[in-house]
């Protein structure tokens, strides 16, 4: 028995020691991954930037190696900021001879796709070659790749080209099955965010606006491919009507959508030829992560002038969500206000580019950010750069800027607000057979109860508050854009516009990308020498290794399993914490590429 206890104890100690060793090795390995990601890349002669078009694109991203390890089969997140900056670095670096695009299924909105496409086009203008290869091309991949000197398709591959679609999910009947209904208060003929809860199909007004902006986005995409490939727009639309995905690879080349059919090994041989190398010579391929860590050739600006680029992406809320189930970025007004105050007081910051990518959210939080932009503008120029979406609350926080720059395919406008209060009276009283009784000190003490329908007086008060909020919104827009409230109301009413249409309406000033906004900021600040600094500060990779990794991994699996139907679950999860009054786009909005 004594020997048994001795050996058992020794075994337990051995297991504990082994566990500690493995843990230390694991932490050391992860630390090594992080350290390697921060190490400056040494570029070899005759290198090629190998940009894989894959992953989900956000404005900015911080790598989480643990999440990547846990979800190796999932698409990684990638920052648009990193892609654009890396293309600029690669164009400037003399040791990098070209760009190799590999289509892998990039997940991005139309404005982001066009922004990357334009950056690739600028890279090409540096005189370096651009080749694109794909086993198959999605429409987004192809729009970017169409600018290449050669578009290469696998002999057994396919190229998708079929146009755009937009669909909404309607919950009215499903909610009625459970005895739940939404009490709606809104201003704006086109404010369609509430329709999924009140209708079973699109209203005529909503169909009109979606048709208009979807056609505008598609026309811009067709025009971009037409210019790159030399195929007229009518022919490209005819190809889309065919649904080109079902055509053979040979037919795709015959139609001029691709240049040649090669496997990957043949494509790499083509890269060797482009650089005048022999068959046995290796071509160093640099990944996005490696190019991100290349030191720029340009010397650091020593003027001390800074143009701050502040990124505001996601749903607009007052405080960061305690249960952000989606893991998506948020614009928390409490934090944004503090950050903008710091930029206002920083004498080295001569101008601010406010990068907005948001479909809106809390009307109250939007008002607070608007006020801080007004105060910031009193001390230095503020230029808004709109990303994929800057609509409703996203436009609210943009309208006070000195100038607004939008992509042609940016979705903006949607000047309108709404209130939405759920009522489960039928569920609890008729289906579950619960009964409620109580006392109150005043007439409206129990207003907004989940368990009864609002009466006429309560509904009138809610509608009046919504109308007051709308008047405030259009007043902010009128003051910011130099128009009357009547003029804003005429183009408001909740209607969504593309950047292209918004330019003609005076809702934006210039069509262009974030670089256009940066140059405009420098011009208005009266400076020619400056450094660009991005805000808010990104967390160091090591500090984010364990942060929300479990939740993010679960979210990735959940979203992949439910697909389009995951969004309603995310909405209902946060329903109880949402502000009563919202300025935002339709909840389950998407353009299907």
Image (tube, grey):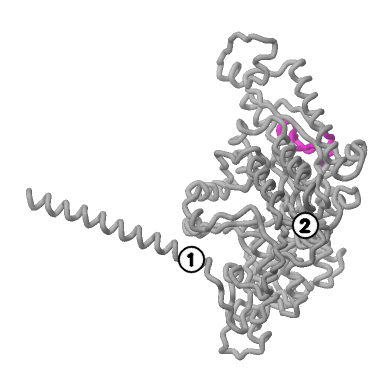
Is residue 452 visible in the rendered image? The answer is yes
- The magenta region covers 188-206
Residue 473 in percent (x, y) is at: 81, 36
Q: On the rendered structure, is 427 left or right of 207?
A: left
Q: Is residue 380 above or below residue 583?
A: below
**SS for callout 2:** loop
Q: Residue furthest bottom?
A: 278
> Earlier along the polypeptide chain: callout 2 or callout 1?
1
Report the front residue among 553 and 30.
30
Q: Is residue 191 above or below residue 99?
A: above
Q: Is residue 519 above or below residue 334?
A: below
Q: Label 1, on which residue?
A: 35
Query: Which of the 4 quarters of the picture holds residue 261?
Result: bottom right
Residue 309 in percent (x, y) is at: 70, 56
Residue 1 in percent (x, y) is at: 7, 48
Is residue 218 visible in the rendered image? The answer is no
Q: Residue at x 68, y 27 (%)?
A: 421
Residue 355 in percent (x, y) is at: 73, 53
Asked whether the beta carbons under mark 2 and mark 1 sit within 8 Å of each other, the answer is no
Query: Which of the 4 quarters of the picture holds residue 115?
Result: bottom right
Between the residue at mark 2 and the residue at mark 1, the CA separation in whole angstroms equals: 43 Å
């Amino acid at each position: 028995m004594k020997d048994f206890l001795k050996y058992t104890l020794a075994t337990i100690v051995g297991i504990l020691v082994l566990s500690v060793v493995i843990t230390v090795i694991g932490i050391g390995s992860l630390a090594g991954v992080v350290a390697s990601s921060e190490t400056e890349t040494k570029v070899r002669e005759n290198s090629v930037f190998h940009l894989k078009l894959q992953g989900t694109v956000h404005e900015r991203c911080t790598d989480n190696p643990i999440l990547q390890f846990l979800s190796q089969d999932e698409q990684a997140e990638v920052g648009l900021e990193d892609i654009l900056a890396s293309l600029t670095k690669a164009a400037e670096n003399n040791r990098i001879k070209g760009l190799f695009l590999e289509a892998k299924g990039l997940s991005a909105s139309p404005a982001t796709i066009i922004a990357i496409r334009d950056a690739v086009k600028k890279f090409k203008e540096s005189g370096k070659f651009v080749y694109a290869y794909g086993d198959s091309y999605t429409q987004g991949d192809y729009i970017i790749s169409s600018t290449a000197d050669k578009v290469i398709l696998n002999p057994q591959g396919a190229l998708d080209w079929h146009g755009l679609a937009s669909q909404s999910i309607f919950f009215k009947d499903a909610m009625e099955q459970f005895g739940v209904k939404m009490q709606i208060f809104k201003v704006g003929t086109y404010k369609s965010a509430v329709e999924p809860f009140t209708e079973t199909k699109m209203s005529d007004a909503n169909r009109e606006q979606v048709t208009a902006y979807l056609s505008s986005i598609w026309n811009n995409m067709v025009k971009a491919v037409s210019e790159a490939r030399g195929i007229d727009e009518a022919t490209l639309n005819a190809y889309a009507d065919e649904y080109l995905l079902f055509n053979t690879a040979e037919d795709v080349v015959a139609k001029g959508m691709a240049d040649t059919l090669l496997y990957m090994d043949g494509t790499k041989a083509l890269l060797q030829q482009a650089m005048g190398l022999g068959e046995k010579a290796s071509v160093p391929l640099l990944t996005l992560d490696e190019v991100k860590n290349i030191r720029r050739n340009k010397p650091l600006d020593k003027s001390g002038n800074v143009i701050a680029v502040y990124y505001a992406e996601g749903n607009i809320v007052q405080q960061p969500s305690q249960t952000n189930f989606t893991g998506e970025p948020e614009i928390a007004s409490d934090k944004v206000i503090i950050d903008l105050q710091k930029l206002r007081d920083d004498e080295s910051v001569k101008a601010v580019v406010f990068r907005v990518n948001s479909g809106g959210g809390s009307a109250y939080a939007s008002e607070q950010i608007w006020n801080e932009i007004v105060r910031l503008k009193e001390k230095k120029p503020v230029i808004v750069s709109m990303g994929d979406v800057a609509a409703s609350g996203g436009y609210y926080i943009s309208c006070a800027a000195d100038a607004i720059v939008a992509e042609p395919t940016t979705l903006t406008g949607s000047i309108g607000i709404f209130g939405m209060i759920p009522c489960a009276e039928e569920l609890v009283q008729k289906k579950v057979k619960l009964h409620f009784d109580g006392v109150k000190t005043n007439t409206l003490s129990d207003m907004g109860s989940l368990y009864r329908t609002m009466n006429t007086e309560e509904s009138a008060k809610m509608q009046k508050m919504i109308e007051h909020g709308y008047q405030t919104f259009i007043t902010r827009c009128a003051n910011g854009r130099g128009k009357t409230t009547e003029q804003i109301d005429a183009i408001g009413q909740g209607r969504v516009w593309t950047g292209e249409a918004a330019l003609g309406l005076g809702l934006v000033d210039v069509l262009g990308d974030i670089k256009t906004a940066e140059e405009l900021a420098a011009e208005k600040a009266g400076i020619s020498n400056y450094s660009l600094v991005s805000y808010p500060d990104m967390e160091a990779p090591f500090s984010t290794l364990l942060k929300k990794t479990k939740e993010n991994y679960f979210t990735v699996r959940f979203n992949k399993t439910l697909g389009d139907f995951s969004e309603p679950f995310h909405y209902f999860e946060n329903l109880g914490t949402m502000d009563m009054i919202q300025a935002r786009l339709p909840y389950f909005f998407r353009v299907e590429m």
